[in-house]
Amino acid sequence: MEPYFPINESIYSKLENNVEATLATISNRYMGSNPAHPITYRAFHTEGFKRLKDYRYDFALQQKFPECEDGQYVYAWAKLWQDTDAPLMFAINCYGPAVLYLNGEQVYRSSIVEELDPKKRIGLRLTLIKGWNFFLLRFRKTTSGIGGIFGTGSFKRHPMHFLSPTKEREGQEGWVFTEPLDQPLEILPTEESVSLAKEKWLPKLNHHGQDQMVHLGDCYPGINDGYAIAWTKLSVQEVDEKLFTIKGQSKGALSVFINHEKVCSIKEVGHFEFQISLSYGDYELFVQSYALEDDWNFSLQLPEELSIISPFPIKGAIDSWVLTGPFKREKALDLNSIKTKEALKEGIDGPVYYKLNQNRLVVRPYLENSLFGKWDYPLGVTLYGLLQTGRVIKRQDIIDYVIKHIETSTSLYRYSLWDKTQYGAAGVNNQLSAIDSLDDCGSFGATMLISSEDAEITDSSLIAKDVANHITHIQDRLEDGTLYRRFGSVDFMKDTLWCDDLYMGTFFLSQYYKKTNDPVYLEDAIHQFISYKKYMYMSDLKIMSHVYDYKFNTTTNIPWGRGNGWVIFSLAELLLVLPENHKKRPELLSFFRELSEGFLSLQGESGMWHQVLTDFESYEETSCTSMFIYAFSKGIQQGWYEQPTPYVQSVFKSWKAMEQISIDKLGNVYGVCQGSGYSFTGDYYKHDLTWILNDTHGTGIVLLAGIETVQLRSWLLDRREGILSEL
């Protein structure tokens, strides 16, 4: 087996026996590679195509163009950014004949199989280039219909949103499209030259002209009572303070606020004017405008020395005004609430968010970081490791980073649920807003609960309640109450039990029991371990099969390393909160010891465990090694082993091995298996399920293993001192 890197490049060669420094190096590398960039805000045209719950766009052209004639064509065009050359999975369904072009080359043409079965989903593996990639769909009308569904082939991992490719819509989310055409385009559109005049691309943009005119009547049609807020920023370039005169016209009563101070108010239609002293800088400007029955707008005339800019960055915005409302006339004005971008506002007919100064253009948040701010299960354990590292090595900046990551997601939870109802699929919280599995909620939810001990986290209680409800009342179960997968994000997951799910489910249940003291969650976690052992325990080896497949009514009998790691990791977490006098504790403790014995017997010569635990020719796998270190160390310190010495030796041997084999001097983590499917053969795990550098399935658990190594050493030294003091 080839080493991951020369030992001279290992962290061990630089920091031998300095585990705390190793933890800091890994943490610094991770945070440096994944900076805390904010959410991206983009304009979205509500007359464009919306995404379905699987995050693919529904090109429902029959509904959009009911007069479209048989034989006519409609094109849809968009672009997608890619950081590196890489293949990605896409998927398409066809309501009729369809052709897909990628960067000017035809990459798909529908066959009669897809055209005759709109439910037929076709996966497409397409190689994207670094930079912008341009997608063009050509649909043709037949008597059966026109259009299709296209987008990401894996929305859990890659929830793609496409952007407009035309310059006048630069930055807006969504596809542009043509009206029905009698003939195919002679020249395909490109970024440099468009075969149609720009005004022929839909949805249509109405440019109102100068920023100073705000057309509230267009944006909120049918409102004859109440008010809306228009928000922008005044930008002043004068160094010294100067008195400025600002004028305007209003159709409707109006109040103007600068930095929350009311500077002007009129009670009827007409002209207004006010003076204010300003010096260099930007100033919040709010206009509270009341509705009229007919038209409803206002305008500002600014001196040449003043300009207005968007109150926050919005890609694709056509001017500098952000609108929200309408609100009931009697609703008290709260400008701080207006400025809170994460929160919905309570409007006349329910929750509202931001619009732009053009009917049908709204503002939506999008998570465009590869990792920071994302909610998924590998990041749950990554952040858990970072949090504990920050605590142990006393690095508040690491703790703050973890809290900010979690809050980026949780603060937009309510919004993302609302966004999904409005536009089909939210641009943030693609898993949290659409929970349909344990993967979507348990791991990250547990870390959120643990992190809330360090700081108050927005809506953590609400989210925890919703996660608990999903696990307890919604997630599929067997008749005996065992959590299982009736369906999955891919078809082969149907009707399976995965030992991974002991982590996905019980880790949260253990932490929620700790928070609520409600025994329902504790008993459920206990039941899962007992049931999973019944179905998946390989008693001859004292380890677990990865999967039980009900399609074949058998286990796979393949002991995947990380799957087994999840089991003992989660069992250790359950034992930590399980009362000493609980009637099931002896049974669970016995199971922990049996698993430990089985894993110990399979430790590799170097100190690491292997991808397939029983196949020493499979690669040395870092995440399972880390979880065995974690569990063994917990077991030693908690007194769960009758003979702890072999486990002490195992912990120190395996941590040293990881420092030499899996962690380089820059803090990169090697040998972490990618997210898995499953198989009845070990060859899949050994050859197909390869490792990925710095995969998030491993970074956090490596940190937790290092922490446990530090704490075990301290525990042993304290114990030695205690024994010596008694002599």
Image (spheres, helix red, strand yellow):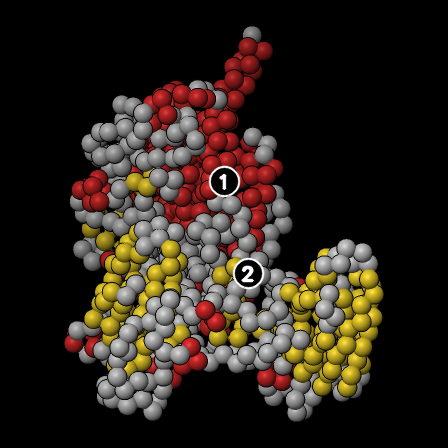
Q: Earlier in the sequence, mark 2 or mark 1?
A: 1
Total marks shown come to 2
Q: Position of residue 200 (x, y in %)?
A: 40, 81
For this rendering, which residue is in front, 514 or 397?
A: 397
Q: Residue at x 28, y 90 (%)?
A: 69
**Which label belongs to residue 32?**
1
119 and 727: which is toward the camera: 119
Question: Could you tell me which secondary element the residue under label 2 belongs to?
Answer: loop
**Residue displayed at 36% across by 86% down:** 65
Q: Could you tell me which residue is drawn at 45 percent across and 30 percent down?
A: 706
Quarter of the view holding residue 542: top left
Q: Is mark 1 on a helix, strand or loop?
A: helix
Residue at image point 30% right, 63% down: 103
Instruction: Tell me residue 537's x, y (percent).
Output: 27, 42
Which mark, by number, is residue 412?
2
Figure quadrant of residue 319: bottom right
- The disc at residue 644 is none
* 114, above or below 382, in the image: below
Task: Give the Cα separation between the discs numbered 2 and 1.
Answer: 24 Å
